[in-house]
Image (tube, rainbow, N blue to C red):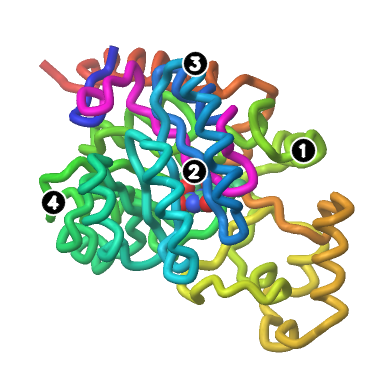
Amino acid sequence: MITTPLTRWFDLQAPVFGAPMAGVAGGEMARAVSLGGGLGMIGVGNLTDPDWLTGQARLPEESDVSFGVGLMAWVLADRPELLAATIAVQPALVSVSFGDPGPYVGPLHDAGIAVATAVNTREDADRATDAGADVLVVQGTEAGGHTGRRATLPLLQEVLAITDRPVLAAGGIATGAGLAAVLVAGAAGAWIGTPLLACPEGLNNAAARQRVRAAGGDRTVLTRAFDIAQGLAWPERWPGRALVNEFTETWHGREAELRGDTRAAEQVRAARRDGDLDHSPVYAGESVGLVTGEESATDVVRRLAADAEVTLRGVPRLLST
Ligand SMILES: Cc1cc2nc3c(=O)[nH]c(=O)nc-3n(C[C@H](O)[C@H](O)[C@H](O)COP(=O)(O)O)c2cc1C
């Protein structure tokens, strides 16, 4: 078994955290990840109903496994009730990402809850440590969903050099060898989203899961097109990485025109309602080409941990005697 400061802290059998993915990772996904020995996170989005979170949190609890909750800082500013609902379900870990985690660390610590935050730049890492976050999640641009513009590995190395706190690597990790690589680099585990996108425990539908399985890693795009079309208040510095589709082919790079185009806005709204994946976002990262079959989230976590162990046992062979 692989042990790191975070497997010890959260009593895990695998150094794998299931990313909070709004619209994909609910209680069933979190439970499945935690049953695999990792820590599953429930994703809370900008429109999440606090009662929904309360219901979802019961699923891991019923199986007697720990779970976490992922919040977005820019959403909490307007919706403090989401923080209250999160504290009430007593997760083992709460992430507050995409904005300043500062105002939320104190209340979470007062409730005995550990705090993680995604960092997308070196400056974010300084802010996270000053804010008192317990765990830094280095999220590279390879990641699926909203993310920054720096790549995982250089930012990971830079952040590890400036903090003694446990650091997780997020973005592009989808095999045991990839997990082993970030552990050798000094991360305390991986925070995975894309490898879970084809799992049956997701809230995404079967057609979206099939699209993920069929997509190649060359076919993602980092774009603000969907956020602009939908008039979402996502801060500019976090575009979203999604599968290339008809909508991104038409609008990515033409964001100025897209702003105020009511027909495009209606097209995305209708596509989301009707399940039209050519004109609505399927958020996925650059590792999507490695996700080719249907596998439970429990098995994904177990496979990554087992394969990472095999890779790590082979590492000494790289050293000449
Ligand atoms: C469909 C999807 C939805 C996501 N939603 C959230 C979210 O609600 N909150 C969050 O902190 N991160 C979210 N993320 C980003 C993940 O937390 C994570 O950083 C990323 O998936 C890791 O990289 P990977 O996709 O290459 O595994 C999302 C990612 C995806 C693919």
Measured as percent of width and height from the top left, residue 88 is found at: 40, 42
Q: Earlier in the sequence, mark 3 or mark 2?
A: 2
Amino acid on which disc 4 is placed = Thr
Q: What span is in magenta?
A: 7-28
Q: Position of residue 175 (x, y in %)?
A: 47, 28
Sequence-wise, which precedes: disc 1 or disc 2?
2
Q: How far is disc 3 from disc 2 in space, using C-alphas?
A: 19 Å
Mark 1 residue type: Asn
Q: In the picture shown, does residue 13 fall above or below 25?
A: above
| Amino acid type, residue under disc 3 in the picture | Ser
Mark 1 vs mark 3: give the one in front.
3
Circle 3 SS class: loop
- Residue at image position (44%, 53%) is 71
Q: Nearer the viewer, mark 4 or mark 2?
A: 2
| Ligand 1 is within 8 Å of the C-beta of the residue at disc 2 | yes
| Mark found first going from the N terminus, 1 or 3 | 3
Q: Position of residue 296 (x, y in %)?
A: 61, 20
Question: Closer to the N terminus: mark 4 or mark 2?
Answer: 2
Q: Quadrant of residue 290?
A: top right
Spatial CA span between label 1 and label 2: 17 Å
- Which residue is the site of mark 3? 63
Q: Which residue is mark 4?
A: 163
